[in-house]
Amino acid sequence: MKLLDGKALAQKMRAEIKAEIEAAAVIPGLAVVIVGDDPASKIYVRNKVRACEEVGMRSFVYELPKETSQSDLEGLLDRLAASDEVHGILLQLPLPKTLDAQSAMSRIPAKKDVDGFDPENLGALVLNKHRYAACTPSGVMELLKSAEIDCTGKSAVVLGRSNTVGKPMALLLLNANATVTVCHSKTQNLGEICKRADILVSAIGSPKCITKEMVKEGAVVVDVGINRDAAGKLCGDVDFEEVSKIASYITPVPGGVGPMTITMLLKNTCIAAWKE
Ligand code: NAP
C-alpha cells in the first residue's frame, strides 16, 4: 500500500505557486466573505488567509455580522466583483438562514468564482471546458496525477452527490475517461457497488463506514470525509486501519485530501489573475 500524501503534495505545489507569484507582474488577490460567527467557518477562513500569506498572495477578509441584510451582502459582492485588486471571491458557507446563498453567490462572476460552484463553471465542467472545477475534487485529481494513476477505463465509484464534492468529482473522473458510478443515501447494495471500484472516492461524511469488506483488493481509495470518531478524534469515511491493508493507494485523514483543497483554491486564484 502506498499513501497518497496530500500534505507533501500541497507543500510542493504551494512552493511552486509562491515562486510563480514572486515572478509575476500581477499579484493575485483573494477576497473571503464570512457572515455570522460559525466557529468552523472562522477556522476555515483563517486557514485560507494564512495559506494566501504563505504564498505571497493578497487576501481581503470581510467579516459581516449575522444580521447582515441580503442587499448589504450582495452590495459588497458587487463591489468585489468590480475590483481590479480582487481576482477571486469566496463566500464562506453556510450563510445564516435569513440569507439566500444562491442569490448571493449569483453575484460572483464566473471568472472570480475560484470555488467553481457557480452554474457557468459547473456547466463548463460538464462540457469539459471549465476554467476551474471545485477545489476538493480538483485536489483529488492532482493527487491521482501525482501518483501517475491513469483513470482511463477504470471503474470509479463516487460516494456522495453534493454539488460541491460528489457531482464535480464524478464529472472530473468521467472527463478523465473513467467509467463512473455515483452513489448516495438512497443507493441500494452500496457494498457490492464499492467492491467493483478500481478507484473509490468517498465523500459521505460518516465516520469509518467504508469497511475492508466493501473494497476490492488493490483499489485506489480516496477519502474526502472529515469526521470525528466516538473518541472525538478526526477520521475519514474509510476505516483506514483495515482498508489500508488491501488498497494499492489510500489517502489518510488528516493529511490526504484536506491540504489539497486550499492549495487548489490558491491555484484557481492564480488562474483568475493571470489567464484571460
Ligand atoms: P453533503 O453535502 O452532506 O453530502 C453528502 C453526500 O453523501 C450526499 O449526497 C448523501 O446522499 C450521501 N450520503 C450520506 N450518507 C450516505 C450513505 N450512508 N451512503 C451513501 N451515500 C450517503 O456533504 P459534502 O459537503 O459533499 O461533504 C462530504 C464529506 O466530505 C463531509 O465529511 C465533509 O466534511 C467532507 N469534505 C471534506 C473536504 C476536504 O477538503 N477534505 C471538503 C469538503 C467536504 P443524499 O444526496 O441522498 O443525501
Image (tube, grey):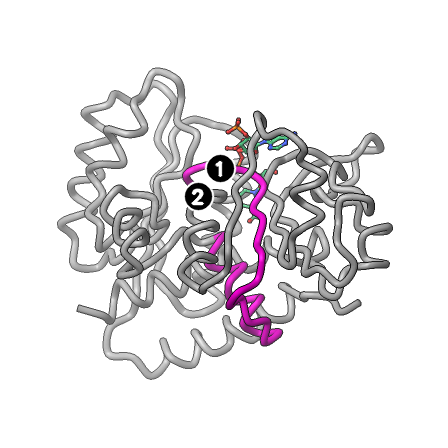
Nearer-the-camera pick, 242 or 100: 242
Callout 2, which amino acid? Answer: Lys
The disc label shown at residue 15, or none: none
Q: Residue at x 70, y 40 (%)?
A: 192
Q: Residue at x 79, y 35 (%)?
A: 229
User: Is residue 259 one of those drawn in magenta?
Assistant: no
Vertical order, 76 against 126 (above or below)? above
Q: Are marks 2 and 1 in contact (CB under 8 Å)?
A: yes
Identify the secondary structure beneath mark 1.
Answer: loop
Residue 155 in the image, given as x and y percentages of width and height: 58, 56
Identify the secondary structure beneath mark 2.
Answer: helix
Question: Going by the image, does 243 lie left or right of 12?
Answer: right
Question: Going by the image, does 71 lie left or right of 98?
Answer: left
In the rendered view of the protein, which quadrant contains the C terminus? bottom left
- Residue at the spot of label 2: 167
Q: Which residues are magenta?
A: 136-164
Nearer-the-camera pick, 247 or 112: 247
Q: Residue at x 51, y 76 (%)?
A: 15
Vertical order, 68 against 125 (above or below)? above
Callout 1, which amino acid? Answer: Arg
Specify the farthest residue to the bottom: 23
- Residue at the spot of label 1: 161
